[in-house]
Image: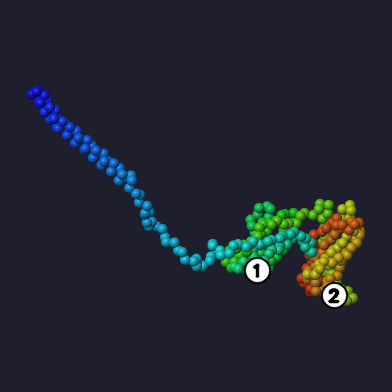
Amino acid sequence: MKKLVILLIGALIGTLLFGGTAAAQDDRTDRTDRTDRTDETDETDKPADRTAPTPTDVRPVDVRPDVRPVDDVRPDVEPEVLKLHCEGRITDAGRAAVACEWSGAQHPRAAGYVLERVSENADPVQILATRDLDVTSYIDPDIRVGVLYGYRVRLVNANGVTIGGSEWVRAGVEKPDPEVEALKLACKGRYVVTDQGRGKAVHCEWRAATHPGAVGYQLWRIVNDGDRELVWRGGLDTLSHTSRVGNDTKVAVYALLAVDENGEIVGQSRPETVRFRHPHHRLVRTAALVS
């Protein structure tokens, strides 16, 4: 009996000593776990700060209407598109030329036109002419037969800045049909004395045509700024002709044609220009004009 009591007392003392220590240890462990979880919640569950930092290099936006003056970099009106048409032709004087016409501008800031040209040989762009707004055409007399040219018209403002224009267009004068013979013509002015008094005349000579279909010649001319007129026509046996012109003649341009039996052109000369510059001086023919 006495041994039983001793064992019970020992067990009670052990429980008090070791059981309390374990409980305290468990309590401390539990508190540590809760602390760790609290720390994790503070770091991960804390709401993000959605307020963006205030920039220091951003300028305030001007919401007022745009009242800045209009300049050439930022035009107030879209560039205007012009329509350009160019066509090669032979003038009344027998010279090759390209005639260009374009649509009139409606741009409120338009001040004039600039016509440009470039050849098929990739030459630099050349300014042919500058024109006021009331002029919408130009004849280019400085071309070569058989060469194709590109033309463009630009619309400019008072400062010369382009504010519109046309697309490039191509034009030229084709080489004549190789079946048309090139005739050689030479003309010279002279003063003559007739029953009506002293007057002006033009003497022309030419080399005989060799085209097998040629049956005769036609001699044409333009006096001063007049119309083209037929001066003379004749057979192949005639190789010269003298024609009178008015005393007020300053310039006369002549051209010779060779025609077949149907009147079709089979030979043509280059234009020959005669100028009367010295009325007081008598012009005379001292040698054959065509060698």
25 with respect to 64 (left or right): left
**Three-letter residue code for mark 2:** Arg
Q: Is residue 202 visible?
A: yes
Q: Residues within 10 Å of mark 1 (few under 14, many from 20)?
A: some
Q: Which residue is mark 1?
A: 133
Residue 207 picture quarter: bottom right
Q: Residue furthest bottom?
A: 196
Q: Secondary structure at mark 2?
A: strand
138 with respect to 249 (left or right): left
Residue 218 badge: none
Compare residues 251 and 127 and report the one nearer the observer. 127
Q: Earlier in the sequence, mark 1 or mark 2?
A: 1
Q: Is residue 141 visible?
A: no
Quadrant for the N terminus, please.
top left
Q: Position of residue 189 (x, y in %)?
A: 81, 68
Q: Is residue 135 above or below residue 12?
A: below
247 with respect to 36 (left or right): right
Label 1 – label 2 distance at C-alpha: 48 Å
Q: Position of residue 266 (x, y in %)?
A: 85, 55
Q: Is residue 200 above or below residue 48?
A: below
Query: Residue at position x 59%, y 68% from top?
Result: 109
Query: Residue at position x 69%, y 66% from top?
Result: 136
Q: Which residue is mark 2?
A: 198
Q: Secondary structure at mark 1?
A: loop
Residue 17 picture quarter: top left
Compare residues 179 and 187 and report the one nearer the observer. 179
Compare residues 130 and 205 and report the one nearer the observer. 130
Q: Position of residue 195 (x, y in %)?
A: 90, 76
Q: Is residue 288 above or below residue 19?
A: below
Query: Residue at position x 57%, y 66% from top?
Result: 159
Label 1 or label 2, whichever lies nearer to me, is 1
